[in-house]
Image: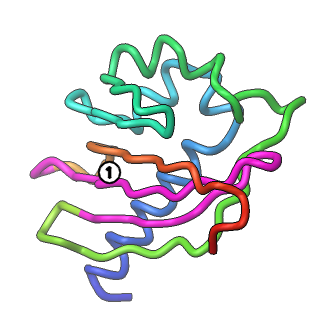
Amino acid sequence: MDGATDDVSQAIAGELQLMDPAVRASRERAGQLLDPEFVEVGGSGRRWTYEAMLAELPDHPGSSADAPCFEPSRMSGVLLAPGLVHLTFETMLGERRTRHSSIWRREDGTTAWRMYYHQATLVPPGVD
């Protein structure tokens, strides 16, 4: 596996971990995957910061093993620059379909990839 493919694979692995209810319910585990400068624009239009996301993530949909979990599809990524990966994908959470774009970065001298930015857009019923 070449470096770019390996980097994209590691970012995808991190993204999938963030969809795991056990990770979402744990401030410590989720905090290891989110960059301290993390920002998200959610499907609701709300802007989330690192601290706000970690505080509320356990109560978000997809954070309980007893409720519907995220079902990702069409996940792909590209290495934008050394230490910077852009992922795009879709998820289903129950009947709710969402398109996602995230940027993962790795700080120089580390092996840990962290989500730096995330955008979610709800897909209305009937839209391809």
Whether residue 99 is in magenta: the answer is: yes
Q: Nearer the viewer, residue 47 or 126?
A: 126
User: Residue 53 placed where, x, y %?
Assistant: 43, 22
Given the image, on which type of amino acid does mark 1 rest? Trp
Picture layout, residue 105 above or below residue 57: below
Q: Which residue is mark 1?
A: 113
Magenta segment, which residues?
A: 85-109
Q: Nearer the viewer, residue 82 or 116?
A: 116
Looking at the rendered image, the quarter that the N terminus falls into is bottom left
Q: Nearer the viewer, residue 49 or 3?
A: 49
Whether residue 122 is in magenta: the answer is: no
What colouring does the structure picture have?
A: rainbow
Looking at the rendered image, the quarter that the C terminus falls into is bottom right
Q: Is residue 71 left or right of residue 113?
A: right
User: Residue 95 placed where, x, y %?
Assistant: 80, 49
Picture layout, residue 52 above or below residue 3: above
Magenta portion: prevailing SS class:
strand
Please state the total of marks drawn on the protein image.
Answer: 1
**Which of the 4 image quadrants contains residue 85?**
bottom left
Q: Residues within 10 Å of mark 1 (few under 14, many from 20)?
A: many
Is label 1 in a helix, a strand or a loop? strand
Q: Is residue 57 left or right of residue 94?
A: left
Q: Residue placed at 36% from the left, 45% from the top? A: 118
Picture layout, residue 5 above or below residue 103: below
Residue furthest to the right: 66
User: Residue 36 placed where, x, y %?
Assistant: 24, 27
